[in-house]
């Protein structure tokens, strides 16, 4: 068996120790006589699994007691709809658009707002600049009465990350953040947000699970048309188990949380993520063969898009990378070129191998 260095944007690589443990426990979890996929979600074994997962997740992110953690289905995309259903409350919400994902969230909210008796406003966009930077404070047109302000703190496709708390929009309205592709990659002050959500398949576990962290006072405002499985209040009251939750995904997420704790938690993983990202950006910036067009203060540590200045070399670059055990580097079609997604599970060795390959390829074709 050879495992490649997998740079997929999602579903993405998982930590190898997690996969090994899952393999060991596949047929018999802790003497239960069956695997996690085969057990009742209401039994004592799975109850222990989900409770441990929530407690480790809370500990990693230092989630305050007045927030609920929900393990839901439907991905981040379903949250694009669920958020206005639960939070719009017949009012207006502000959306900040800094890339494809926040634009999709805005479009979905716009599509639903009328039916929910509310409105959504575009409160700032960097689309005219090709989504190559964060919004600046003086570009925001915020409504102080907004039901909430939605933003995406890491744009997976464009490689733009809102890194420092100082950049957060100054507003008294609750901030609602899509953190799908950088959650758990760095510490975050949860108390600055009303709601945080993240699809699992980037930095948490398998697809099919989305985690929502929601402040107590934002629960219980759902529009009357909201289906029960989409109502945060109903899901919170039922411990995310109104219906059968994605049990295997929650189990793997729990193993990932334990792996993160064993790495030293989020401060330690952040230090490693900084090293990895710096290595790749410094190499790209020093090269005249490759290029990253994202403004420096806006660059993502997790998703690094880059272009070969000679685009006719894209296919040979990808073929050579694959032969060297470096996979899924093709960029998203909206941006073109390449993209290296270097989530928590990507090792520094993997990034070193990528940089070595890029240097070698440039030397052969430059
Ligand atoms: C991947 C991604 C999504 C979509 O996730 P799904 O689980 O496929 O719905 C939304 N937002 C961001 C930032 C993403 O990276």
Image (cartoon, rainbow, N blue to C red):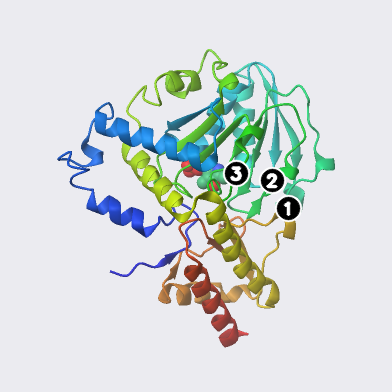
Q: Describe the element under mark 1 as helix, strand or loop.
A: loop
Residue drawn at (51%, 56%) of the image: 343
Q: Earlier in the sequence, mark 3 or mark 1?
A: 3
**Where is residue 267 shown, x and y percent of the image?**
57, 52
Say which residue label 2 marks.
98
**Residue found at the far right of this picture:** 138
Foreground residue among 197 and 28: 28
Q: Nearer the viewer, mark 3 or mark 1?
A: 1
Q: Do the numbered discs 3 and 1 sit on residues whose CB atoms are within 8 Å?
A: no
The reply, left or right, for residue 254 in relation to residue 129 is left
* Relative height, residue 233 to residue 252 (above, below): above
Dot 2 falls on a residue whose secondary structure is loop
Q: Quadrant of residue 103?
A: top right
Crowding near the residue tagged with mark 3, few <14, some 14–19, many ≥20 C-alpha atoms within 10 Å? many
Side (left or right) of 1 relative to 118: left
Q: Residue furthest bottom?
A: 364
Q: Which residue is mark 3?
A: 101
Mark number displayed over residue 133: 1
Does the beta carbon at disc 3 come under 8 Å from ligand 1? yes
> Whole-Å distance between the Cαs marked 2 and 3?
8 Å
Rounded to the nearest angstrom, the CA distance separating label 3 from label 1 is 14 Å
Question: In whole angstroms, how far apart are the C-alphas of marks 1 and 2?
Answer: 7 Å
Viewer-closest of 186 and 183: 186
Which callout, 1 or 2, points at the residue further toward the start of the chain? Answer: 2
């Amino acid at each position: 068996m050879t495992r490649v260095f997998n740079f997929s944007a999602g579903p993405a690589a998982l930590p190898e120790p997690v996969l090994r443990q899952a393999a060991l426990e596949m047929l018999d979890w802790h003497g239960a006589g069956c695997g996690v996929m085969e057990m009742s979600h209401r039994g004592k074994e799975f109850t222990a699994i989900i409770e441990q997962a929530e407690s480790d997740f809370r500990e990693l992110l230092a989630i305050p007691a007045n927030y609920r953690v929900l393990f839901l289905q439907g991905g981040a995309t379903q949250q694009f709809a669920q958020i206005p259903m639960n939070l719009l409350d017949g009012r207006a919400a502000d959306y900040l658009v800094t890339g494809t994902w926040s634009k999709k969230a805005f479009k979905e909210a716009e599509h639903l707002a009328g039916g929910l008796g509310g409105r959504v406003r575009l409160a700032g966009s960097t689309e005219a600049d090709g989504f190559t930077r964060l919004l600046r404070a003086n570009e925001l047109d915020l409504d102080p009465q907004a039901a909430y302000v939605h933003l995406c703190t890491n744009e997976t496709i464009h490689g733009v990350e809102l890194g420092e708390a100082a950049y957060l929009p100054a507003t008294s309205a609750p901030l609602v953040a899509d953190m799908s592709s950088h959650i758990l990659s760095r510490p975050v002050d949860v108390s600055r947000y009303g709601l945080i959500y993240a699809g699992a398949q980037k930095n948490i576990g398998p697809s099919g699970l989305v985690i929502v962290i929601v402040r107590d006072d934002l629960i219980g405002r759902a529009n009357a048309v909201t289906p029960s499985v989409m109502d945060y209040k109903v899901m919170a009251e039922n411990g995310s188990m109104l219906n059968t939750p994605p049990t295997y995904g929650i189990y793997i997420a729990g193993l990932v949380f334990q792996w993160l704790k064993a790495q030293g938690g989020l401060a330690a993983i952040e230090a490693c993520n900084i090293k990895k990202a710096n290595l790749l950006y410094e190499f790209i910036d020093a090269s005249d063969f490759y290029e990253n067009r994202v403004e420096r203060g806006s660059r993502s540590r997790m998703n690094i898009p880059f272009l070969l200045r000679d685009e006719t070399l894209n296919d040979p670059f990808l073929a050579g990378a694959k032969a060297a055990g470096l996979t899924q580097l093709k960029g998203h079609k909206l941006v073109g070129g390449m993209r290296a997604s270097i989530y928590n599970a990507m090792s520094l060795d993997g990034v070193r191998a990528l940089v070595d390959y890029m240097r070698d390829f440039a030397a052969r074709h430059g």
